[in-house]
Image: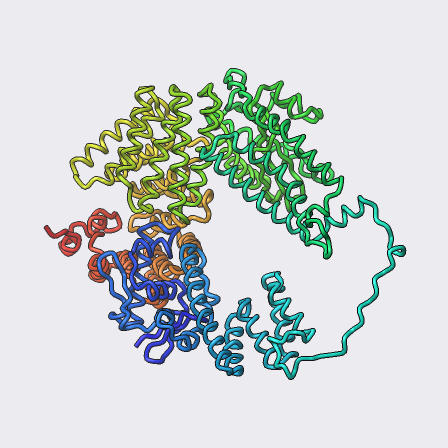
Amino acid sequence: MIELRTLGRGAIRRDGEELSGITAQKQRFALLAYLAVERRASRGRLLGLFWPDREEEKARHSLSQAIYALKRELGEECLQVEGDSVELAGEACDVDATTLQEAAEAERWAAVIELYRGPFLDQFQLPGAPEFEKWQSATRVRLARLARGAFRHLVEEHVNQGDLAAALTTASRWATLEPLEDEAQHTCIALLARSGQRSTALKHYETYRSRLASELEVEPLEETRAMVERVRAGESRDLYPPSDTPRGPPQPVPAPEPEETRPRETWLSTFIRELRSPRIARAALVYLGAAWVVFEATDILVDRALFPNWVFHLVLYLLAIGLPTTLLLAWTHEPRVAGASWPAWAERIRPIHVALLLAVVVLAPPSYVLFFRSAAEPRPQIDAATLPATTRIAVLYFDDHSAGGELAHIANSLTEHLTHELAQVERLDVLPRNALKPYRDQGISRDTIARQLDVAMLVEGSVTGTREQVRVSVQLIDAQAMTHLMSSVIDGTADDPFLLLDEVGDSISRLLRERLGEEIRLRVWRAGTSSPEAWEYVQRAARLSEEAARISQEDTAAAVGTLNLADRLLARAEAADPAWIEPVVARGWLASNLSIILRAGRARDVPTLLEGIAHADRALEVDTASASALELRGILLSAMAEETRDAEEAARLESEAEAELTKAVELDPTLARAWSRLSLIHSYRGDFRAGLIAAEHAFEADAFLDNARVVLYWLCYNALNLKEWERVARWCGEGQRRYPDRETFVATELVALAGPEGPAPNVERAWQLQMKQVELSPDDARSVTRAQTLMQVAAVLVRAGLADSARAVIERARAGLEADDPWTGYYEANARLQLGESAEALRLLGVLLEAEPGQKEYMASDWWWESLYDDPRFQDLVANPD
């Protein structure tokens, strides 16, 4: 019998023996706990809970490995996999959380508190799995609520029966399990006091108060503090037995101070003193908090076009006059003075209060008119002719702030290097250094330089520090508004000036190009319309689209709602300027993103793709030669081809997509996304040469690095399949420099080195890549990644003539595996084949294909196995049954 303990510290036992291997693997234990409480879940749900940031294929592989390991530890009968769902068999596993819930439903309170050993999965964390943590928190709250009700019922039952000792025992256990639970601590303190243990009750309270202050930085509830004060004073009969109630002689009431001896207060000091009363202070704080919430909510709703703009001004006006009104109401409703004949609020009115109220009334109308008049004023039309060229950039000479001008040569070199790097981007108009020399060290203001040079943006920077530690600061400035668009600080060393220029200069260049892309895109949009309303709607929609991309992994419903709001704004922009096709194209891209989010990245939502294609068609009706609309339509048609099961229809869609994308790049060769999609089409078709050429065009066209990671992937992929090792090294190295936290580029280079016809076998480089890939892999997959990469190192060792070392590494890889992994066998098969052990290699490949028969088509064309293509045994392995 399997026993799973989730209340308190998690544990799992089989026939009384603890299975520490599962609890040590956080991912597997969390998966088991989730299935234990929910009983059944789909694979898609589990992938989203535990591997949200991983590619789908790798995530499914990790899930399969986890299920396999759990079945091996617990037995086949515990976990049942049927189709797309995974279920935990309740009859084979006893789960304390489920038993507690059943006991609570049957009102067996004693059983509930016996089962409750602490919060659900206490102190258990699973980094990188936000959806699981949300579920864990909700389950913890739900079970704690059931336990709290059970403790409350039992304490009340014992008290009603007169068994104060049993009530105190139950309350003490409750307080121990929940040291920060207000009701538990309050009940325990009250029962201690009621049983005559006054000093123990006060000591318990002090311990509780100290813990709250140190862990949560809060005070106990006011009700608890009031009860403790009564305990200290010995005044509460409901807390003490009647015989123990302390009584003393009545204390004399002090005589009132004579009127003539009291200091007289002026009306101003009286007013200030009264304003500082607790009631008024609380009212002010509550009002300010509520006002902030209302202000933010209104700003969001107006920004998302749910309310018109004038609503924001109205709310701002009401909040402004509401503060003095709230303070007046709080003051006039202070407690009534004993013996007064007038209502309390009337007795407290003074001339200053009347004056303040009159000021609010008098200033209200002009304030209202002022706000709404400014809100209703027509905004000036946008005139693109008055704007400087959006791509015209000037790089100012970097300032040297080092002691004694020690780093002046670095500052000058960085300026020249950065100017040269940005000038290589065809879509930028970068002024030459000679144009900036007259302004160097002249103390001329930036706005004067920008105006005289007629530039849209300025780049400025400074260098400080010493030769051992150089710090470079760089800023991108809007030359019109003189505002900072981007700033960054990068550290380096001047020991090797050329290395510093390569590392720091290239980093600055990438940062600027990425930010310039966003800014120039907005400015180009702005120049495309004369309607300020349309421009504003497009800007707001762009912000919402970015927000949706940011939250899509955490909250799909919120991301979908945000994209729908963005689409509504773009529809308004389209209505405001029907001749401007940018909002129409943007709606198509929104539909493309939405089609991915709706299906959680596993496929595309076809109806939404069709909506995107319809937007592209409408844009082409306005401008038949719109390269951006052709790019959108081609990419969406290609996505439709991937979702179509009919082979002929898929081929037709792909052919049409290729034609649209080819026409788009002929009209505008800078469309990096179109080139990248063409690379994908050629690569999937097996035309790796055309795929590589398209990817190289995409890399050149991606001036602002919007799509660099995807483009670099296709460059690596196609170069690998063409066995062009110099290009593999170049593009994988570029990917590793730009995206050092990505495993893809490291893995691709290692695959090339391990292949039977790979580049020159560099054993040292193979070990470096192996350690880097293990470091970048997720914690739950690290042992498998280590084994697989070691197998690839073994293949490199064979190619280098070190067969004995290769066999030792293979044994080391096998010894480090916690469970059998078919894909590790795939990598071992490559090493075995190069060792001349073809029979063992075929056996290992057979094990993989038996576990995953869908890999047969891929393996049949995998260049790693070219030497086996004519082997009948290999042909039998990869043959698909009719």
The outermost residue toward the left is 882
- Residue 344 position, x and y percent, is 69, 50
User: Eyeballing the image, is 59 above or below 682?
Assistant: below
- Residue 547 position, x and y percent, is 45, 40
The outermost residue toward the front is 341
Query: In the depicted view, which residue is nearer to us: 140 or 517?
Result: 140
Count of picture labels: 0
Residue 841 is at least partly visible in this image? no
Query: In the depicted view, which residue is nearer to us: 879 or 83?
Result: 83
Query: Which image quarter: residue 483?
Result: top right
For residue 279, side relative to residue 850 (left or right) = right
The outermost residue toward the top is 385
Query: Which image quarter: residue 608?
Result: top left
- Residue 289 position, x and y percent, is 59, 47
- Residue 360 position, x and y percent, is 67, 34
The residue at the point 61 percent across, 38 percent down is 473
The residue at the point 64 percent across, 75 percent down is 203
Colour scheme: rainbow
- Quadrant where the N terminus lies? bottom left
Query: In the depicted view, which residue is nearer to us: 294 or 93?
Result: 294
Residue 272 is at least partly visible in this image? yes
Query: In the depicted view, which residue is nearer to us: 217 or 689?
Result: 217
The residue at the point 23 percent across, 33 percent down is 654
Query: Which image quarter: residue 701?
Result: top left
